[in-house]
Amino acid sequence: MTADALVYHPTVSHYLRFIATTVGRDKLLRTLQYFSRFYAWYLFRTNNPPRLIAPFEAIKKQFALTRKALRLGKNVEHFKAAAAAMDDTKARDEFLRYCAVGRQLGYAAYLTLDMATYLDAAGIRKFDSAKRLQKEAYRAWFVGLLFNTVAGLYTLWGLRQRAQEVDRADGEGVVESKKIERERAATNLQLVSDVCDLAIPSSALGYANLDDGIVGLAGTVSSLIGVWGAWKKTA
């Protein structure tokens, strides 16, 4: 009876829907990858022996390679999204439309270049230009994230303007106010995720002098936000 209650519990069904998605699995692996990056740094800084650090270094490297494989071919999705954003002439805000195009093209270029380095990263076929391609991939990712960050800040400014115009004395104004608050919360959460993610390519490209502890923590936070988002979408 207890076993049946557990097996047929709605949370188990929700978990199965979540884990069946590529996004759900990727976000979980990403969380473990970046937490391991942070924890390996922490163990090293606290003078722990290499045998304790090695498992987390292995998780960091192996999960990064697994996620690289899961991303193969995903660039097409972002090229299509960029084209759709460009063709969306009915968009309410032209600035956000161009930010969406820039974001999607940045992500598409990142995934294309990242895909080109897979054979080298997996040890299947090494080639000299792999490091340069990976650096260009990080640069494209940085650009995509920058577009999304700017769009987030612009959206918050727009929501602030809308909130000032709402008349909370009537029922429609109260409903609109609640809608604005929901949009603001979602935008703030995405902005936190983007700023955390910016730490990763910024460090890799030398734009910011960040150690593995900060990068690992930033990646863990943005990954947990991604897990939460993917979990809600499969509810």
Image: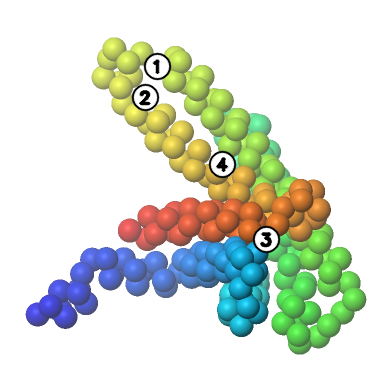
Q: Which residue is mark 3?
A: 212
Q: Secondary structure at mark 3?
A: helix
Discs 2, 1 touching: Cβ within 8 Å = yes
Q: Quadrant of the C terminus?
A: bottom left
Q: Secondary structure at mark 1?
A: loop
Residue found at the very far left of the displayed protein: 1
What's the CA distance linking mark 4 and mark 2?
21 Å
Q: How is the image coloured?
A: rainbow
What's the CA distance linking mark 3 and mark 1?
45 Å
Discs 3, 1 touching: Cβ within 8 Å = no
Residue 60 point in image, percent of width and height? 62, 72
Camera-near label (3 vs 4) is 3
Q: Which residue is mark 4?
A: 191
User: Vertical placement of 211 versus 189: above or below?
Assistant: below
Residue 39 point in image, percent of width and height? 57, 66
Q: Amino acid at mark 1?
A: Val
